[in-house]
Image (cartoon, rainbow, N blue to C red):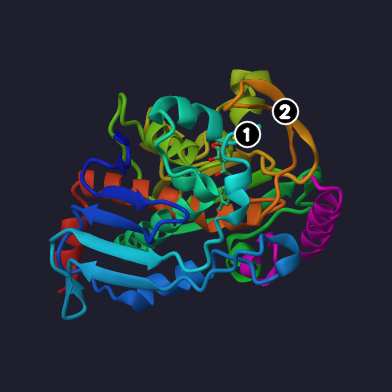
Amino acid sequence: MLAGNSTGKEFVVTSFGESHGKCVGVVIDGCPAGVPLSEKDIQPELDRRIPPQLKIVSGRIEKDKVEILSGVFNGFTTGAPISMTVANKEADSSDYEAIKDLPRPGHADYPARIKYGGFNDYRGGGRFSGRITVALIMAGAVAKKLLSPFNVDVLAYSEAIGNVKVGKSLSPEEIRKRTYETSVRCPDLAAAEAMEEAIVNARKEGDSLGGIIECLALNVPAGVGEPLFDALDADISKILLAVPAVKGVEFGAGFASAELKGSENNDAYRMKDGKVVASTNNAGGVLGGFSSGMPIVVRVAVKPTSSIAKEQRTVNLQNMEDAKIKVGGRHDPCVVPKAVPVVEAAVAITLADHIIRAGLIPKALKERK
Ligand SMILES: Cc1cc2nc3c(=O)[nH]c(=O)nc-3n(C[C@H](O)[C@H](O)[C@H](O)COP(=O)(O)O)c2cc1C
């Protein structure tokens, strides 16, 4: 029934679990043997998922602890499927009984009920909960290990929350150093403060905010990607649109390029230290579905959290009458901060898949031994 839970052609990531079930987990098939891997590589990525500042996140603070069940032996991947789980310990299903027949506007409740005939686990959003992104974080940690021989660095941060935007240009060093110093995952400290305030205010009003996450992938070798339908930008877009609450994806100049002339939008080439480089990066590091050798720059639009305390109109699916809903329970007034490491993981997973498909990773591993 729930077909569609796998991504990738060589590095195949399958996500499983529901928000209030026993656990959430992931199976990775196709990870080459010989990658040094232990829980210590995964846990720090999970620890970054939830900002510790209670005022901007839901009350569901999980001490997520990864368990590797298979595919790792003596500290290295074996080539067998890697399976990993995180137990759901903090689930509180009490708020969901009252609204099980009242689909939350903006959430997956109504279409999921139609598709699964009411058999789906609706507690906590079930399979459509942000908690499912734990699987992406775990697989992303493995993908990052695969990308490390190439010095590929994937860095995401909050570029905007509501109408508060980053106010300065940011170097990769700043993004690396500062992003996780702030509750909102924004390396521009002044903007971060204003973003936090905006989230706190929205929460006070029983409302929520969305935002924009930018992700850079540095040092991706040129020529990676499999056009036509597995174009690098197409595959990255697909995995990013699978992240709950993501409603838009753009690369480089993106939608703004529609207003530019060719002479403005083209990234002119020149030689630098014996290498071909582009003077600008309006393409966002992808041309013709291949990496261009320039940084991959992708931005996602994240919608405001749908579960809000403010009263909204809905319908009662038991008696099919109009109804009102105020969503209680533990919801993030803005999911952007938690989605930042998820976006990073999603991009890393797709890059790992494509770098294996380009035949680069097994060679790199052999060279390491
Ligand atoms: C990390 C993360 C946390 C989320 N937390 C919540 C939440 O607390 N409440 C909520 O209503 N939606 C939350 N969402 C968003 C919903 O899961 C999502 O809106 C819903 O599944 C409908 O899918 P769509 O918005 O992609 O169409 C979260 C999303 C992410 C990525």
Q: Callout 2: helix, strand or loop? A: strand
Q: Position of residue 53 (x, y in %)?
A: 71, 70
Ligand 1, seen in the image, is in the quarter at top right
**What residue did someone put label 1 on?**
102
Cα separation between marks 2 and 1: 8 Å
Which residue is nearer to you in this view: 109 or 144? 109
Q: Residues within 10 Å of mark 1 (few under 14, many from 20)?
A: many
In the image, farthest residue toward the bottom? 74
Describe residue 83's horizontal placement relative to residue 47 as left or right. left
The residue type indicated by label 1 comes to: Leu
The quadrant in which the N terminus is found is top left
Q: Which residues are magenta?
A: 179-207
Which residue is nearer to you in this view: 135 or 59? 59
Describe residue 79's horizontal placement relative to residue 284 as left or right. left
**What residue did someone put label 2 on?**
323
Labels 2 & 1 near each other (Cβ < 8 A): yes
Q: Position of residue 282 (x, y in %)?
A: 57, 34
Examine the rendered structure and indicate whether residue 285 appears above or below residue 158: above
**Residue 368 seen in the current view:** yes
Label 1 C-beta lies within 8 Å of the nearest ligand 1 atom: no
